[in-house]
Image (spheres, rainbow, N blue to C red):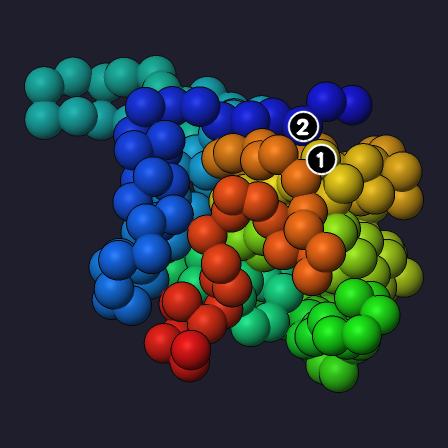
């Protein structure tokens, strides 16, 4: 399944601002949240609806509402947290889980240190959030853990991906839809996306 590269002009403009090394911490954090909200709009396009009848100030009307599909948002700590508020602004009833992973600087492999998911995760559609899909290791490991808890319908939402990350995630989880705002050229020798935007977590939280 091909990844969905969301090339809406507003998203592409905001991604350009994100990439700029002169963009400060507050603006960067706001942009991540805004782009996440726009990606959420696209990733939830297939949510089912049902027809209801309501009374407007003028007349009775038949209109549509969401058909009760349960959703869960699972940011990968820590950078995925930067996407959470933007997503919740559109789907405030979603439950939230957390998976903590860090990348071993020598092996570039993800190391899990925390996992807390809604008890009914198996009954929910899950959106996994992480700004960068680089090697694909963190996303693959997080989704593996979520599947172990029974979830079956999972989507990954990120800001920028490398071809290597897309390929790795698709190989490990071909059933997972991938939504990103940009597909970049490659990974460098340190496992960073090129041209990318640097370390998303450090830029979101001002820790570098």
In depth, the one of 127 and 55 nearer the eye is 127
Query: Marks 2/1: CA distance?
Result: 10 Å
In depth, the one of 185 and 12 nearer the eye is 185
Q: Where is residue 70 in the image (x, y as percent from the top left)?
A: 61, 48
Residue 122 visible? The answer is: no
Image quarter of the N terminus: top right
Residue at the location (17% across, 25% down)?
56
- Secondary structure at numbered mark 1: helix
Residue 172 visible? The answer is: yes
Residue 163 numbered tag: 1
Q: Where is residue 117 in the image (x, y as percent from the top left)?
A: 70, 70
Image quarter of the C terminus: bottom left
Q: Determine whether, in the image, residue 117 is placed left or right of residue 65.
A: right
Q: In which quarter of the image is residue 63?
A: top left
- Secondary structure at numbered mark 2: loop
Residue at the location (81% across, 36% down)?
167
């Amino acid at each position: 399944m091909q990844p969905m590269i969301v090339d809406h002009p507003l998203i592409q403009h905001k991604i350009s601002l994100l990439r700029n090394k002169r963009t400060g911490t507050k603006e960067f954090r706001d942009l991540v949240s805004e782009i996440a909200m726009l990606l959420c709009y696209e990733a939830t396009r297939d949510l089912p609806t049902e027809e209801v009848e309501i009374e407007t100030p003028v007349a009775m009307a038949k209109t549509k509402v969401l058909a009760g599909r349960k959703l869960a948002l699972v940011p990968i700590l820590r950078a995925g947290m930067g996407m959470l508020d933007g997503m919740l602004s559109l789907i405030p009833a979603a439950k939230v889980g957390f998976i903590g992973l860090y990348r071993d600087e020598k092996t570039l492999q993800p190391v899990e240190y925390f996992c807390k998911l809604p008890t009914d995760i198996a009954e929910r559609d899950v959106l996994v959030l992480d700004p960068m899909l680089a090697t694909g290791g963190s996303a693959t490991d997080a989704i593996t853990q979520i599947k172990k808890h029974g979830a079956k319908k999972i989507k990954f939402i990120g800001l920028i991906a490398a071809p290597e990350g897309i390929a790795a995630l698709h190989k490990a989880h071909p059933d997972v839809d991938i939504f990103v705002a940009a597909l970049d050229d490659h990974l460098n020798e340190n496992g960073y996306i090129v041209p990318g935007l640097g370390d998303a977590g450090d830029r979101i939280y001002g820790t570098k």
